[in-house]
Amino acid sequence: MSADGTEETPLLKRRLTASESKIHNAKLFLAVFSAVLGNFSFGYSMVFSSPVLPELTSPGADPRLRMDTEQAAWFGSIYTLGAAAGGLGAMLLNDMIGRKLSIMMSAVPSTIGYLLMGGAVNIWMLHIGRFLTGIAGGMTAASIPVYISEISHRGVRGALGSCPQITAVFGTLSLYALSLVVPWRWLAVAGELPPLLMVVLLVFMPSSPRRLLSMGQEEKAKKVLLWLRGSRYDTHIELRAIQHSISMQSKVTWSQLGTPVFYKPILISVVMRFLQQMTGITPILVYLQPIFARSNVSLEPKYDAAIVGVVRLFSVAVAACLMDRAGRKALLYTSSMLMFLSSLTLTMISHTTPCPPGPSPPNLTLSSDYGLASDMGHTLAAGHQGPASVLPLIATMVFIFGYAMGWGPITWLLMSEVLPLVARGVASGLCVAVSWLTAFMLTHTFTHLVEAYGLYVPYLGFTVVCVVCLLFNAVCIPETRSRSLEEIENYFRTGRTFTIRRSPSTIQST
């Protein structure tokens, strides 16, 4: 069977193979690079508060900008609320103006946000600037994976689908590297460059061929495919497959949302994004330094971010290499098992290891970690030294490695692959909003749980969630490796097959 549902005769198979052998990916890679600059900015802006807050909470900070514990906590967490708002905004923009223009629009709040933070003379300017960069991050998170999946062919879609995650990690590492030599205001100035470069490059990049065909612009879609695949590429088969999928789509009604072709992929995507955050990755990364302090880990704070960044980058690179070889489900199984074993280890360690005493007041919470670098330095020095002190560090690195190898990048890729075309823009925005709202609530809940019960309870909860992730992957997630977007969509329409061949009666009943 071909991607458009026609019987694959030997002649058609030869034509398909010959056409695919003539694909040139150079311009496709350029288009993907132009888009993922938005993810670079996303990774940069997400951790912007990490090197900035110690400066703004120190006694020597500008009195107009000096933050107390509550203000510092909001500066760190308000980004996730902005990202949720940006995801909801992308629900409308993706279908109103298209994926490419939605990505380009994200540069507006990003640039304004960095301008406010770079020239801030009041705390409210810092908070609003942080919120605006969060909106930009939510918009790019909802739009870029969809754009990449729709311009890529199935031979490289898995690897290219990992690019957003990889470039986001590069953005994070770039911020930490710059923060060692650049004052915090200049970090904001530097943050304006990637989104501006993204806009300049995307002006010359094509729109999604699926978007163009849905608007009736067949000739333009053909030119776009020739630009993306090479001048010798036979566009007929791919255009026919895309058109076949679009012709079966119409305006989604509430009654249609109750059919499997819609509710199954949407539920899978939403639950995956929910479980992704419930594994605890966000609070672990945000509160890494005080977690190590409570776990008796002897590690200099300045090395925390670098080690985490290198581990994340290595594991995402491994996932990108294996995505189209091992398959999505195999990597998700591996990821779930690694996170389960490491979180179980951390649960047992935190249950048997008393928190080290420190000079902090008894009512101190984790949300104040940014303003207490010196206190935690004394706490770290007071920690017990020995082989056991390395176990929490190793377990945490394994957890981050496991997450970034599977549940980190693959959830983004699968979201863009399984969502039906007619609802892809809206549903992807919904997924991003659910993800960031979950991250915001979990981060604050983590703070209170650790204050009341220590690290044991949240780690135990993360261990249970990892088991749920394992089961959910086994029962609900389909393998999409080497499948066209039309084949994946037909999987949910027909039940348990990846063909697109359907009888007229089945089409009418749907």
Image: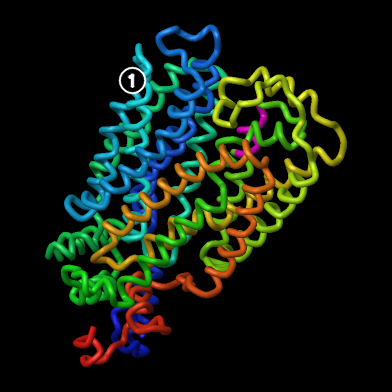
In percent of width and height, residue 401 lies at 63, 50
Q: Quarter holding the C terminus? A: bottom left
246 on left or right of 355: left
Residue 243 visible from this viewpoint: no
Which residue is found at the position 37% from the left and 69% from the top?
Answer: 265
Which residue is found at the position 37% from the left and 21% from the top?
Answer: 126
Which residue is found at the position 71% from the left and 26% from the top?
Answer: 300
Identify which residue, 150 or 292, lies in the foreground.
Answer: 292
Work out whether 6 lies above or below 26: below
In percent of width and height, residue 76 lies at 47, 30
Asked if residue 306 is among those painted magenta in the image, a careful observer would answer yes
In percent of width and height, residue 482 lies at 45, 71
Which residue is found at the position 31% from the left and 43% from the top?
Answer: 86
In which quarter of the view is residue 132 placed? top left
* Range of magenta residues: 302-308
417 on left or right of 234: right
- Magenta-highlighted stretch: main secondary structure? helix
Residue underneath mark 1: 125
